[in-house]
């Protein structure tokens, strides 16, 4: 090896190490700076309220149909005992449910109870229904297709449904179950056409296969997470990008998508290569919290929700299964359940743009997704381990 090659190797190695140390320094700084007692309490909303706290909980993802004025919620009370991302494998037989919420009249009606509809699933096998654990969603309002990441005990899959949005009795019809070796841990989904998806796998090593390697991947920020391009028409699957803890994904426009890297913590914007469908990095920006899911509103703003203090989220994930949510007198009282704060922010989409905080605090905890209907001036926040949904008015 020549001297110049040797020097170049050393320089490259130091650059990689410096990048890794910068990422870890950022995460450590956030953990210290966002600890309880130091976290700011922020709300930029004109009004806000928590709805359905006595009916739903552990809602991870939300998608809006702004034309029809409803939201689809991915909720799973069974997350307390079965969470393949956080490594909870106690009991998988308490299934999740998808809901349709007519949110448009939230601040006009005296009661929201009639506006929430659990979505029955026709043509979905009973055995699959009993172990259904929904996570991320992708919704196509033109075709009424709904793709759902399902972390079933038999293995992760993507379920495809067609929505019947009947106002009186909405329902879902199961079309197919999608599996592939590259979809070993599907987290968030983005439908770019009726047969094309981008799907994030948060880890290379899953908690099911190897808890130790999964933890090592998480805390080292190894870029084992992937974004997979799937074409259901041609049965094509390929890895389009790698990044650490790939999580939420959203389309900024027809040519660019944003992907959250939870443990970096940052958001990366990619250009879609129209020929290969690979994702080519355009820019990246850091956040002051661990971003979970992403959405884009009608004005093109990127809405981010996530977790400012991860130790609190981990504690809730470990302890929620002993809480007496069913009111049967066994377990810890609901009032004494663990809590973890939320952080919701927006990015205006400009290269030199700024991130503006919209909501920070623990009035509503473990924020995982935030969505906004610009025309109606309303937004929703879901909580990974929270009761109900936070609805805001601008």
Image (cartoon, helix red, strand yellow):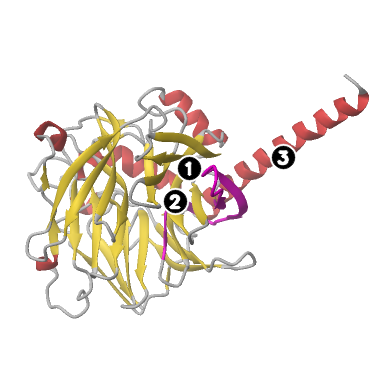
Label 3 secondary element: helix
| Residue displayed at 13% across by 39% down | 124
Looking at the rendering, which quadrant does residue 377 occupy?
bottom left
Instruction: Decide which of 313, 215 is in the foreground and name it.
Output: 215
Choose top left, top right, bottom left or bottom right for residue 343.
bottom left
The part of the chain drawn in magenta is 267-296
Q: Residue at label 3?
A: 18
Q: Position of residue 75 (x, y in %)?
A: 23, 50
- Residue 214 location (% of width, % of height): 45, 29
Q: Which residue is mark 2?
A: 249
Tell me, yes or no, if residue 82 can be seen here.
Answer: no
Q: Is residue 211 left or right of residue 216?
A: left
The one nearer the camera, 312 or 349, is 349
At 39% from the left and 46% from the top, the residue drawn is 196
Q: Nearer the viewer, mark 2 or mark 3?
A: 2
Q: Is residue 29 left or right of residue 147?
A: right
Q: Identify the image quadrant of the N terminus.
A: top right
Residue wearing tag 1 = 246
Contact between marks 3 and 1 (CB within 8 A): the answer is: no
């Amino acid at each position: 090896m020549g001297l110049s090659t040797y020097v170049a190797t050393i320089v490259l190695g130091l650059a990689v190490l410096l990048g890794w140390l910068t990422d870890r320094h950022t995460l450590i700084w956030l953990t210290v700076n966002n600890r309880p007692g130091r976290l700011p309490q922020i709300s930029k909303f004109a009004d806000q309220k928590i709805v359905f706290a006595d009916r739903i909980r552990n809602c991870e993802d939300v998608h809006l149909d702004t034309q029809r004025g409803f939201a689809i919620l991915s909720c799973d009370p069974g997350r307390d005992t079965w969470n393949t991302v956080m490594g909870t494998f106690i009991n998988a037989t308490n299934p999740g449910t998808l809901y349709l919420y007519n949110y448009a009249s939230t601040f006009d009606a005296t009661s929201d109870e009639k506006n929430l509809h659990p979505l029955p699933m026709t043509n979905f096998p009973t055995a699959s229904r009993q172990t259904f654990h929904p996570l991320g969603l992708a919704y196509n309002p033109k075709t009424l297709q709904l793709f759902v990441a399902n972390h079933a005990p038999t293995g992760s899959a993507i379920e495809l449904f067609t929505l019947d949005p009947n106002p009186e009795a909405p329902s879902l019809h199961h079309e197919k179950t999608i599996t592939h070796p590259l979809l070993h841990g599907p987290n968030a989904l983005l439908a770019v056409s009726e047969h094309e998806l981008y799907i994030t796998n948060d880890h290379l090593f899953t908690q099911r296969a190897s808890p130790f390697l999964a933890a090592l991947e998480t805390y080292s920020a190894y870029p084992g997470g992937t974004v997979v391009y799937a074409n259901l028409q041609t049965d094509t699957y390929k890895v389009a990008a790698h990044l650490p803890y790939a999580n939420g994904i959203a389309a900024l426009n027809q040519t660019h998508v944003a992907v959250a890297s939870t443990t970096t913590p940052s958001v990366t914007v990619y250009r879609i290569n129209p020929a290969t469908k690979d994702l080519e990095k355009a820019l990246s920006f850091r956040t002051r919290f661990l971003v979970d899911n992403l959405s884009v509103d009608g004005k093109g703003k990127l809405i981010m929700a996530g977790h400012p203090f991860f130790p609190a989220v981990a504690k809730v994930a470990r302890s929620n299964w002993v809480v007496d949510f069913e009111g049967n007198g066994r377990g810890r009282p609901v009032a004494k359940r663990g809590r973890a704060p939320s952080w919701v922010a927006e990015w205006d989409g400009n290269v030199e743009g700024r991130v503006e905080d919209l909501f920070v605090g623990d009035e509503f905890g473990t924020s995982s997704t935030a969505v906004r209907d610009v025309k109606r001036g309303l937004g929703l926040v879901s909580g990974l381990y929270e009761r109900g949904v936070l609805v805001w008015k601008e």
